Image (cartoon, rainbow, N blue to C red):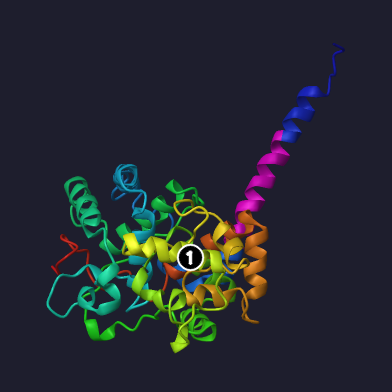
């Protein structure tokens, strides 16, 4: 091999260029985040507990991994919990409160579960770092980790939320499965999100389960016609009838029900959406193009999902001296 007197210099220059390129990419990402989420960045930050409780995210991740090994549907459960919490009074863990008239007692929250997992995580965090990590951040981090375990994106998310001091069931006004696309999208835009965010977050149904009662009319007597919903694939109608004879629920993604991927959107384009609002996403003028893009590009869907989750996780958060850090997630201090 011939000796190149410039080899070391070239290698050094290349390393310097790579370093500068990496720094510029990180800086560009921060700029994008700043312009998209200026309020969130001012209140929350990645690594919020790096000094006050450096093992916090590891504790959460390990306990979620243990639970996922026992029951992989924990991903769907935590996604539902996170959504139901953030869309009522913001991401403040008000959903976790146990009381006669708390949010937990509202009809739409009857299907929310995995409260015991949150309790176990909180107990370990309190033992390691008393009165430091909020229940609101536990929900956010646990949801993030469960998505990665199901094959979804792994990402950093800002923390620093504090727990709310109010939880009333009368505040719960969450959409049902027959909501119009316009109504669903407006629910998200009212929280500072856009159509891409709305469709991406509804794409969490890729690991979702739906109670048969929520779509029974679509497979038996759609809108009093005595026939199934004509917009549903007849093969799916037959399959869901069989499923619901033997079970109370069915997978909302009939292709890869426990895998976080874009198969859900591919199923919608084949008229195989289980929930009515899901199927409408594929045909409505406002959302059908987004569904097509997500169906054709799994990586793009996952990137947009991360952006949407970060936005949702910053909805009406309490920070600084607002709210509290609960010692028990089920009770106000």
| Residue nearest the viewer, comparing 246 with 82 | 246
62 is higher (above) or lower (below) than 264: above
Q: Residue furthest front?
A: 226
Residue at position x 30%, y 76% from top? 108
Q: Is residue 230 visible?
A: yes
Quadrant for the N terminus in the image:
top right
Q: Secondary structure at mark 1?
A: helix
**Residue 29 colored in magenta in the image:** yes
Relative image position of residue 22 (x, y in whole percent) = 65, 46
104 to 249, vertically: above or below: below
Q: Which residues are magenta?
A: 15-31
Nearer to us in this view, 19 or 116: 116
What x and y, as percent, mark residue 291? 62, 69
Residue 201: tell me if it is visible.
no
- The answer to whether residue 207 is left or right of residue 34 is left
Please tell me which residue lies in front, 192 or 162. 192
Outermost residue on the top side: it is: 1
Secondary structure mostly seen in magenta is helix
> In which quadrant of the rendered view does residue 287 lie?
bottom right
**331 displayed left or right of 18:** left
Q: Position of residue 332 (x, y in %)?
A: 15, 70
How many numbered marks are there?
Answer: 1
- The quadrant of the picture occupied by the C terminus is bottom left
Residue at numbered disc 1: 238
- Judge whether residue 32 is colored magenta: no
Up-down relation of residue 109 to residue 243 (above or below): below
């Amino acid at each position: 091999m011939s000796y190149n007197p410039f080899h070391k210099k070239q290698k050094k220059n290349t390393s310097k260029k790579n370093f500068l390129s990496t720094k510029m990419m990180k800086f560009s990402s921060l700029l994008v985040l700043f312009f998209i989420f200026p309020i969130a960045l001012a209140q929350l930050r990645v690594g919020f507990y790096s000094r006050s409780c450096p093992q916090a995210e590891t504790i959460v991740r390990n306990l979620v991994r243990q639970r996922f090994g026992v029951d992989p549907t924990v991903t769907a459960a935590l996604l539902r919990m996170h959504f139901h919490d953030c869309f009522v009074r913001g991401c403040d863990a008000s959903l976790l409160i146990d009381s006669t008239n708390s949010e937990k007692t509202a009809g739409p929250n009857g299907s929310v579960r995995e409260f015991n997992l949150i309790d176990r995580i909180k107990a370990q965090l309190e033992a390691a770092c008393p009165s430091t990590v909020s229940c609101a951040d536990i929900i956010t981090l646990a949801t993030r980790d469960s998505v990665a375990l199901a094959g979804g994106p792994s990402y950093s998310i800002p923390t620093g939320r504090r727990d709310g001091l109010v939880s009333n069931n009368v505040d719960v006004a969450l959409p049902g499965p027959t909501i119009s696309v316009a109504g669903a999208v407006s629910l998200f835009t009212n929280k500072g999100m856009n159509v891409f965010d709305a469709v991406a977050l509804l794409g969490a149904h890729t690991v979702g389960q739906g109670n048969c009662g929520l779509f029974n009319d679509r497979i038996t007597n759609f809108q009093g016609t005595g026939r199934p919903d004509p917009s549903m694939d007849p093969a799916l109608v037959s399959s869901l009838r069989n499923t619901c004879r033997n079970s109370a629920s069915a997978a909302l993604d009939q292709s890869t029900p426990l895998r976080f991927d874009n198969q859900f959107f591919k199923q919608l384009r084949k008229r195989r959406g289980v929930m009515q609002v899901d199927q409408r996403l594929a045909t409505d003028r406002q959302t059908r193009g987004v569904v097509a893009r997500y169906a054709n590009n799994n990586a793009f869907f996952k990137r947009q999902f991360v952006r949407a989750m970060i936005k949702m996780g910053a909805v009406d958060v309490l920070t600084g001296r607002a709210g509290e850090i609960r010692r028990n997630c089920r009770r106000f201090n």
